[in-house]
Amino acid sequence: MNEFMRAVAEYTFMRNALLSGLLASVACGVVGTLVVVRRIAFIAGGIAHCVLGGIGAAVYLQTVRGWQWFDPLYGALLSALLAAVVIGIVSMKAKERTDTVIGAVWAIGMATGVLFLSRTPGYGGDLVGYLFGNILMVRTSDLWLLGILDLVVLVSVLIYYDQLMAVAFDEEYARTRGIPVDLFFIGLLLLTALTIVLLVTAVGIVMMIALLTIPAAIAGRFATKLSHMMIWGAILTIVFTTTGLALSYSPGLPAGATVIVLSGVAYLLVVLVTAPGGRLRFLPVRRHDS
């Protein structure tokens, strides 16, 4: 731990990694809670894997076509927002099985990215980097984007907290209150897409969904209010990212993977302890805050 703290004090990349974990925790705690409560983790996973299509297209345009201004982050953002809208509309309107449609969109996004990267010189390294991420490579500009994301998420949730809570817990109740459920559902998916894009840099496409959902899922085992679940989800994300960075530094382990393993083990332990017959009693989230 002392070696890790010295590295944070000495190296900019370590400070950026630590700060990215702190900033990402806000979006993970808030958006992750809504994803878990609304039970749309599979939809979030579909959006996450579609990101590779936009990244692959951006890398191809940069390298082959000379579009240096078109950062892979822009491609990821466009593909994630498009996927969120398509999956959201399909989930609400289509008669096909939702999971089948999401799986198809998921596969198309991944395959499109692979096709673009296969036509790009040196695509192999880029593919591995985007799939698994590297929190130690977070740039200062990425920190500003994470800060903007946190601001957007917090303002959106503060303004529409009651509506989002009603939509997350009980769509029929929300409709009887005159809340435009479909509109808020799409809005939730767009917030999820933004969060996904900015988490890709830290932990990659494959492991991103775990960081988005596991801390919130653990918080949901004990929280009695949605707002408390969001707060504890954010705190747990801070704990997991900071501890994962510290544990991975000395042995030179992949930081993102260490964070995910740590959070996953913590979740399994909490589930075992809070299961029927365990020492702790499960406290479900209330349907509505009082």
Image (spheres, rainbow, N blue to C red):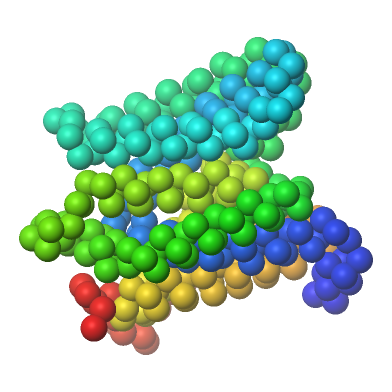
Q: Is residue 274 shown above or below 164?
A: below
Q: Residue at x 32, y 78 (%)?
A: 225
Quadrant of the image containing the C terminus: bottom left
- Where is residue 275 drawn, in percent x and y? 32, 75
**Residue 290 seen from this side:** yes
* Residue in front for this viewpoint, 212 or 163: 163
Q: Residue furthest bottom?
A: 279
Residue pictured at 80% horizontal, 60% vertical: 14
Would residue 93 appear left or right of 130 to someone viewing this image? left
Q: Position of residue 138 (x, y in %)?
A: 73, 50
Residue at 62%, 37% in the rendered image: 73
Q: Residue furthest left?
A: 176
Quarter occupied by the N terminus: bottom right
Image-based side of 180 in relation to 223, left or right: left
Labels in figure, total: 0
- Relative to 148, residue 72 above or below: above
Residue 12, given in percent of the width and then of the height, sits at 85, 59
The residue furthest right is 10
* 249 up-or-down from 89: above or below: below
Q: Quadrant of residue 33?
A: bottom left
Give the camera-side residue of 147 and 32. 147
Residue 42 position by quadrant: top left
Which residue occupies the foreground of this view, 158 or 271?
Answer: 158
Position of 91 compared to 108: left or right? left
Q: Position of residue 150 (x, y in %)?
A: 54, 60
Residue at position x 13%, y 58% in the image: 178
* Residue 28 visible in image: no
Q: Quadrant of residue 286?
A: bottom left
